[in-house]
Every structure is written in structure tokens, then in C-alpha cells.
Image (cartoon, grey):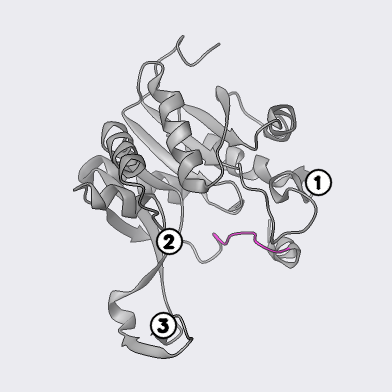
């Protein structure tokens, strides 16, 4: 099956094209977590959520087979498509969206970091439900530390209110036409964004925040792997 052969209402794009520079010599997305490649955990959660119709894995250039083998370790029968990413995450997301746009376009797309293996099926469902209402949604967690803003020299310039600041997670869900248009606009402007909600909001979209999961952490360093409680 190719992306041109079938129509899906909701697709989850798993971004896994990073070089894992901070992780070490290996690509963290292929590292084993309790006997299965890290990348397969997100795929399993998508299947178990019951609301995802297909997966799109954005993989490092030249590593489609390794990505396919990693996803193949996940149980389930969701259709899975693969496309190479770019130099930055923003490039990779845009390239994934353009890949989806080459066939019957989905109504919704969830964009999830492949390095967040502990995402729960319930969080996926809640984010998509909010997206259906607002057009965009993401999971967030409260920030418990005192939040400071610093300048380029490292000096504190502002003391931010924790009541109006949160920590953003993925998956971030959007109506597909809106996020595609936003990323195309971002490419033309040359602007660099923090994440996809910023891209979407900068193009006039609204994003609703749902309660995130404290366990939905991102693997950045090798020491992050033992955090699993599964």
C-alpha cells in the first residue's frame, strides 16, 4: 500500500529523524527498551488508543530499513508509512506533512516525538478529542520550579509566573490543512520555531492545552532509559 492508495481520518506522525547527538554514538530511537526498540513503544500506544488510523514514521535519511524493523516489533496492524526527514525537526515535520499531502489528506494529524516512548493511549485520545473542538491541542504539565528568563550573558532578566507557564509535551494534534499551511508559511519566512504549536499559532491557529502525563518524558541521554516503569 502507498499513501496514494488509501484515505485515513487521523494519522500520527512519529518524528524520529534526529541524529541523537546528545545520546552518544547510537541512534536513540533504535535503542532497546525492555527488549524492544524505543521507537516501537510509541507505535504500540497509538494502536492501543483506538483513535489512530495510520502511522507515518519520519526517519533519518538512509535508515528506512532500520526504522521499519523497529516499528515491526510493535504489535498491531496499523498501516505504517515511512519518509526521510531533514536537517532539523521543523524540516522533518514539514516533509512529513508534504508526504501526507501527496495522497488523500487526513482530517487530523498528531505529531509525536519518537523519543517519548512512555506516551499513554489515554493521553493520545484526550489530545485528539480537544483537537476536534479547537483545531489544535497538546498535553502540558505544570512547572514546579521557579521559572526565570535569562539573557545571552546568563543574567536573569525576568521572573515568570508559574501559574501561566507550563511544560509542553507531545503528541500535538492539529487539523491537517491548518498545520500544513502554517509549515509552508514558516518555510517561506525562514523563521525557526520551538515546536509545532508555535508554528500553528503564528499562522492564526488556536491550541488547547490538556493535562499531560508526568511519565511522558523525553529520552535525551542514555541515563534516561532506565526510567521505564512498564
Q: Earlier in the sequence, mark 2 or mark 3?
A: 3
Whichever of callouts 1 and 2 sits on the residue coming sooner in the sequence is 1
Relative horizontal placement of residue 93, taking residue 164 as reference (left or right): right
Q: Which mark is residue 212?
A: 2
Range shown magenta: 216-221
Q: Give the residue displayed 68% in from the left and 28% down from the top.
A: 64
Q: Between 131 and 75, which is closer to the camera in this rendering? A: 131
Quadrant in the picture for residue 140: bottom left
Q: Is residue 218 magenta?
A: yes
Q: Is residue 18 left or right of residue 135?
A: right
Do the residues under discs 3 and 1 have CB atoms within 8 angstroms? no
Q: Main secondary structure of the magenta part?
A: loop
Q: Residues within 10 Å of mark 1 (few under 14, many from 20)?
A: few
- Residue 144 place in picture, x, y as percent: 44, 82
Please tell me the numbered disc located at residue 114: none
Between 193 and 65, the one nearer to me in the picture: 193
Q: Quadrant of residue 94?
A: top left
Q: Which residue is mark 1?
A: 35
Query: Mark 1 to mark 2: distance in Å?
Result: 26 Å
Q: As displayed, is residue 103 above or below residue 144? A: above
Helix, strand or loop at mark 3: loop
Which quadrant, please, contains the N terminus? top right
Amino acid at each position: 500500500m502507498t499513501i496514494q492508495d488509501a484515505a485515513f481520518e487521523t494519522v500520527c506522525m512519529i518524528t524520529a529523524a534526529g541524529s541523537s547527538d546528545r545520546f552518544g554514538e547510537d541512534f536513540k530511537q533504535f535503542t532497546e527498551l525492555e527488549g524492544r526498540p524505543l521507537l516501537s513503544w510509541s507505535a504500540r500506544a497509538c494502536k492501543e488508543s483506538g483513535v489512530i488510523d495510520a502511522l507515518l514514521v519520519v526517519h533519518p535519511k538512509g535508515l528506512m530499513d532500520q526504522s521499519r524493523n523497529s516499528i515491526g516489533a510493535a504489535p498491531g496492524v496499523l498501516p505504517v508509512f515511512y519518509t526521510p526527514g531533514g536537517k532539523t525537526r521543523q524540516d522533518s515535520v514539514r516533509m512529513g506533512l508534504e508526504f501526507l499531502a501527496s495522497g488523500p489528506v487526513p482530517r487530523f494529524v498528531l505529531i509525536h516525538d519518537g523519543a517519548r516512548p512512555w506516551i499513554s493511549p489515554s493521553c493520545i485520545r484526550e489530545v485528539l478529542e480537544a483537537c476536534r473542538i479547537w483545531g489544535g491541542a497538546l498535553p502540558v504539565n505544570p512547572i514546579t520550579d521557579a521559572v526565570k528568563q535569562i539573557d545571552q550573558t546568563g543574567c536573569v532578566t525576568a521572573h515568570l509566573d508559574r501559574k501561566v507557564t507550563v511544560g509542553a509535551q507531545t503528541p500535538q494534534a492539529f487539523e491537517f490543512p491548518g498545520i500544513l499551511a502554517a509549515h509552508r508559511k514558516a518555510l517561506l519566512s525562514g523563521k525557526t520555531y520551538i515546536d509545532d504549536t508555535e508554528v500553528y499559532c503564528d499562522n492564526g491557529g488556536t491550541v488547547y492545552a490538556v493535562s499531560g502525563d508526568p511519565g511522558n518524558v523525553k529520552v535525551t541521554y542514555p541515563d534516561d532509559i532506565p526510567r521505564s516503569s512498564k
